[in-house]
Image: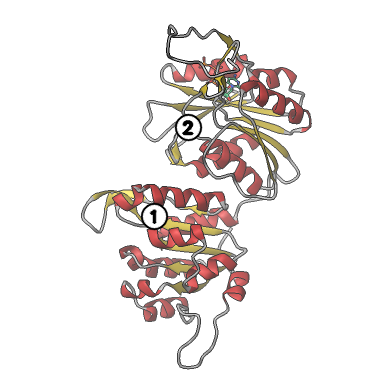
Amino acid sequence: MSLAGKHIILGITGGIAAYKSALLVRLLVKAGAEVQVVMTPNAKEFITPVTLSTLSGKPVISEFFTANTGEWHSHVDLGLWADAMVVAPATASTIGKMANGVADNMLVTTYLSSKAPIFVAPAMDLDMMAHPSTTRNLSLLRSYGNHIIESRAGELASHLTGKGRMEEPEAIVEVLRAYFSRKDDLAGKKVLITAGPTFERIDPVRFIGNYSTGKMGYAIAQEAAGRGAEVTLVSGPVSIPAPVHPNIRIVNVESAQQMLDACEEVFPTADAAIMCAAVADYAPVAPSAIKIKREGNEPPVIHLVKNPDIARALGAAKRPGQLLVGFALETDHEGDNARAKLQAKNLDMVVLNSLRDAGAGFATDTNKITIFTADGRTVPFELKDKRAVASDIIDTMLSL
Ligand code: CTP
């Protein structure tokens, strides 16, 4: 599917990568899109409005009013006109404003008024990119359903080398093409997703848990809902923002037993279940009702009991037509372990992460997966943003 006739707002902010915006406008126009450039005042220090208005064939908008005529630029109309808004390059400052609703320029005001899908291509120096405030603001944008077009590692304007280069214009255009060619291929389907860790209580202040952040499961929930599914997200305790989508219902749980109870309630009417949670394998047999004290006591011995295996329980209850997807996080003998889980838990496919792959596993924004299907396929994927990984998982699930 082409971009022909699509209305695209291109938001340009003040970073060196703004020089690439000219090419981005050119490529979008060549693909048949109508492009309206909205610049922040700072962006004009990096590229002139004349270049951009010539390439887009439309006057660039930057201020709320045209100074000499007093004509008001309606961010509301603009937001409604758009089929998509792309912010490229997106500086740390604009990302922060978008995340927190600081509408002090035309670009952010338009963003807040837009009902269209939003694509954000960050570009900044590596230290700014790695700063917790940037990480947090990007997570917030993701939680609003915005699509982050990850920046690349490479040489930066500062001559330092690291992550922060804006994705190339050609690739940004490809992301948009892919977006507009997507289908509502999960419309009417009910999907159950587990995410995050489980916490198994030792006493009122301590627990057994793991490093899972819930990012992968939340990305799958967002992607499935974006593709039309009605999602129940059964989430262990996490500290990332909840995904915001009218089709996502979140059930918060703490322990494996609570997660199992929630899943058993939903699974009978689900079309598919994706078991992304890192469920603790063991729980203390007898959690203490009061805080275990240190003074005067020997180190306690905590007796553990095996937790229920939720994926296995659903696998045993699965009826024809239901799909069950599991994950396998492995450090060694990855393929063999993953295939063994596929069989043992009666899964239709298993998504393998190897902790040996950099950028895969817990607490990262990226993941590198290999999918093993019950019909015998092994499908490896590149390292990608977790939302893109979520899309690959759902595509493969649909192929079953
Ligand atoms: N899983 C589950 N309930 C459990 C343990 C695991 O639902 N109690 C699911 C996970 O969500 C995942 C898959 O089973 O989809 C594999 O989890 P993993 O922890 O890798 O497998 P285990 O069976 O616990 O095997 P091990 O820890 O020995 O590798």
Q: Which residue is drawn at 60% across and 11% down?
A: 286
Under tag 1, what secondary structure? Answer: loop
Tell me where residue 159 appears, x and y as whole percent: 21, 55
Tell me where residue 316 appears, x and y as whole percent: 71, 17
**Which mark identifies residue 379?**
none
Which color scheme does this rendered protein use?
A: secondary structure
| Between discs 1 and 2, the one toward the N terminus | 1
**Which mark identifies residue 167?**
1
Residue 285's image quarter? top right
In the picture shown, does residue 10 fall above or below 316?
below
Residue 137 visible within the image: yes
In the picture shown, does residue 396 fall above or below 14?
above
Q: Which amino acid does label 2 sit on?
A: Ile
In the picture, measured across the screen, residue 369 lies left or right of residue 322, that is left
Q: Quadrant of the C terminus?
A: top right
**Which mark identifies residue 369?**
2
Under tag 2, what secondary structure? Answer: strand
Residue 378 visible within the image: no
In the picture, measured across the screen, residue 71 lies left or right of residue 54, that is right
Q: Compute the Cα span from label 1 to label 2.
A: 22 Å
In terms of depth relative to the viewer, which is nearer, 225 or 30? Answer: 225
